[in-house]
Amino acid sequence: MQQVEAYLRERRDEHLRQLMDFLRIPSVSALSEHRSDVRRAAEWLAAELRRIGLNRVEVMETGGHPVVYAERLDNPGGPTALIYGHYDVQPVDPIELWTTPPFEPDIRDGKLYARGASDDKGQVFMHLKVIEALLAAEGRLPVNVKLLIEGEEEVGSENLERFIAAHRDLLKADVVVISDTALYARGVPSLTYALRGLAALEVHVIGAKGDLHSGAFGGAAPNAAQALVQLLATLHRPEGGVAVAGFYDQVRPLTPEEREGFAALGFDEEKLKADLGVDALPGEPGYTALERLWARPTLEINGIFGGFQGEGTKTVIPARAGAKITCRLVPDQDPERVLDAIEAHLKAHCPAGVRLEIRRMGGTPAAITPIDHPAIRAAMQALSDAYGAEARFIRTGGSIPVVGTFGAVLGTPCVLMGFSLEEENFHAPDEHFHLENFDLGMRALSRFWHYLAEGMK
Amino acid sequence: MQQVEAYLRERRDEHLRQLMDFLRIPSVSALSEHRSDVRRAAEWLAAELRRIGLNRVEVMETGGHPVVYAERLDNPGGPTALIYGHYDVQPVDPIELWTTPPFEPDIRDGKLYARGASDDKGQVFMHLKVIEALLAAEGRLPVNVKLLIEGEEEVGSENLERFIAAHRDLLKADVVVISDTALYARGVPSLTYALRGLAALEVHVIGAKGDLHSGAFGGAAPNAAQALVQLLATLHRPEGGVAVAGFYDQVRPLTPEEREGFAALGFDEEKLKADLGVDALPGEPGYTALERLWARPTLEINGIFGGFQGEGTKTVIPARAGAKITCRLVPDQDPERVLDAIEAHLKAHCPAGVRLEIRRMGGTPAAITPIDHPAIRAAMQALSDAYGAEARFIRTGGSIPVVGTFGAVLGTPCVLMGFSLEEENFHAPDEHFHLENFDLGMRALSRFWHYLAEGMK
């Protein structure tokens, strides 16, 4: 272990120069003019993987941007980890708000500024350097490792599910390791063990054949906008929380240990209010804001529309109105069952005189890896050791669909061992990565592989 | 009387040719390219008024399109009527849906097709021909008559209130007579004795400083769209009717006679449902649909908006959402008091975590002329005689702001003696006017002036 850390310490400048080369490639997956750059980033990765000693390195076609695959199976019969990450990056607009150009990496105040520095090229690169150091110092890796680095994460991983399904045997593993999430806060080693899922639908309320004049028909004709607000208002309880029958039926309750762990993080609700510019944080009663964000499902109206939206006044009775709705789901909610419950609720509460059109837009389940899973314990130990402080269990309120895909298609649990910080401007100008987490993260990852090998023996 | 009717009968073809000349002028007030046509229509009217024997005929400037004024004061000390109408017309788009061109009048099946045939050039012209016939047959008019024919009714009569206020003495009258409303149905002589008023406001709900990611903040951050639907849903009672405290306080109840009169019209609620394509006519309990349309106030959401309205899904928590609201008012509701009540209700029901911006857009009171007013009785008698059937009292659910202006500025009650039919496509392609009502309407108007002279002696 000391040899590995010495290797990384001694070659730090060289490694940062290599990472900067990787970051200079503008692999913006959303923009067709960068198509060849995206491929160039894949080729760069493949070449580096070959150079450091991975086997079967291949740039594989997906129908969209390619994935890079590599493996090193030093332990026949031993545990296998699949490292997932992405080499594509977000667009850079508004370009004028960058202090230094997004594809000319710059280090200032111990932070590396560039598009992709934290999301996710920097973290993918850390895995490569840890493998390189382990191979250099020990001649072999403690566990079998496969890498699947994709180029379409920032455009919704459109082709990935099909690719994974088509390569089940190739990708077979005991655990997936992903470094694409954030620490709880600076200096707080923390491991994300659960994500929320998603379920989406649209509801349209239809009244008369067409919009009507409120003078001629107001008082007798159904108003689709009014019916919509009456209908949508029934979805939540007046005191907060979702009023849909069955909505919470499958929710896995937080354990007392989890609640204690969350409470110990000292989440600052007053700071959140100030950050958002609001005087209350409304939500489901009986839970702290952090519990609601991480471990309770929600039903959000994302958009609402109907009737006249222009300047001034138009005395119209809208014939149509609608809303877009998404739910954040938690373990063990089934997205289809949640959508069934909402659809049944909407139909049961449809006001007189109007009819509904409901469009289900699908969903993805939440993901959770049991905190006593050997891979989770190995990661927690590695984080605690590397950072010199006890690692914390955290969740995230967001969703990473690929985690659901790994669970659903491969049946493989995920370890979300990420090293970015929420304030690092991923998807925004001046994206950066704190180099303290580059160093401590690699220290944690190199220990992790050893602990994983022991824990999963 | 017989002489007057004979005069109209004998000159019918000549009169229709004159009306067609008037209709050929494309006096579309909304379109600047027709500015000179609008003035040409005013000049045409003024010339015709001079020709038939009116005095003090003048095309008067308003800042926008001009008004035409004329008078004939044959009865010193006798009652004076102010005839109001408009010579401007609606735009003609979609032009391709017209069977014959909108400004090339055509008679088919006893109906005169042209833009403005019923709204309102045809009805203004009827007044001119009745005056012409009375003067020809009797040498004088039974009452003093003033005419105020404007050119901006179809664009909201923007300059009229100021014009009326600036010419109080010139326009002083005992009663205003307007022929710009519809009969209850074909063959049913009927008089509109009340109009609804209007009050308008916008409400905006504001949550966080900006739109938020529902993964990161869903469960703790206020959702402006959700708060809006909760807020708006409180405006109506679940069983129908407006839930705003004080909303109905000033409403003048229908008399038993009025309710009987409405019921006797045999309004067909099933037909209305079929016409609208709905299976219910929701509204305030305890009133028939016709009573709700004509004599009960409403609160309508005319438009609703907030958050993401595009294709697909966006997991956003909207920071802002809003609605446009108008109320149809009935006698004796004060628009400002109604807006006060709604504003107080909205503030009292504002959900936690959001704040409101309320924009009041003003209003206009309802109008009613007592059914025992001598002018109303004269009109009812004239209609019954001309149509050979007992005239009916009707109301309309719409608003004619100028009626409120005459009441507010001049203190003059209005008689709404209109001869169009709802199915005559005003504001739409193939506008037309049933010539049976051209004939019977002039017969009614010529009698009306005599009955008015007697009734107001």
Image: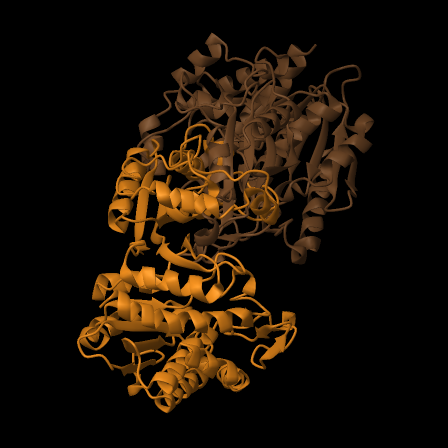
Chain colours: A brown, B orange
- Which residue is pictured at 54% across the width and 70% down the height? B436
Q: Is residue B322 visible?
A: no
Residue A48: image location, x then y, percent: 69, 40
Residue A362: image location, x then y, percent: 66, 33
Residue A379: image location, x then y, percent: 57, 19
Quarter of the C terminus of chain B within the rendering: bottom left
Image height of A268 relative to B210, above or below: above
- Which residue is pictured at 34% across the width and 26% down the height? A269
**Front-most of B89 and B263?**
B263
Q: Residue furthest front?
A: B2
Is residue B117 shown left or right of residue B220? right
Image height of A319 relative to B28, above or below: above
Residue A412: image location, x then y, percent: 70, 21
**Front-most of B234 and A193?**
B234
Q: Is residue B359 visible?
A: yes
Image quadrant where residue A137 sits: top right
**Front-most of A199 and A433?**
A199
Is residue A367 shown left or right of residue A394? right
Is residue B142 shown left or right of residue A391? left
**Front-most of A131 and B360?**
B360
Is residue B384 shown left or right of residue A341? left
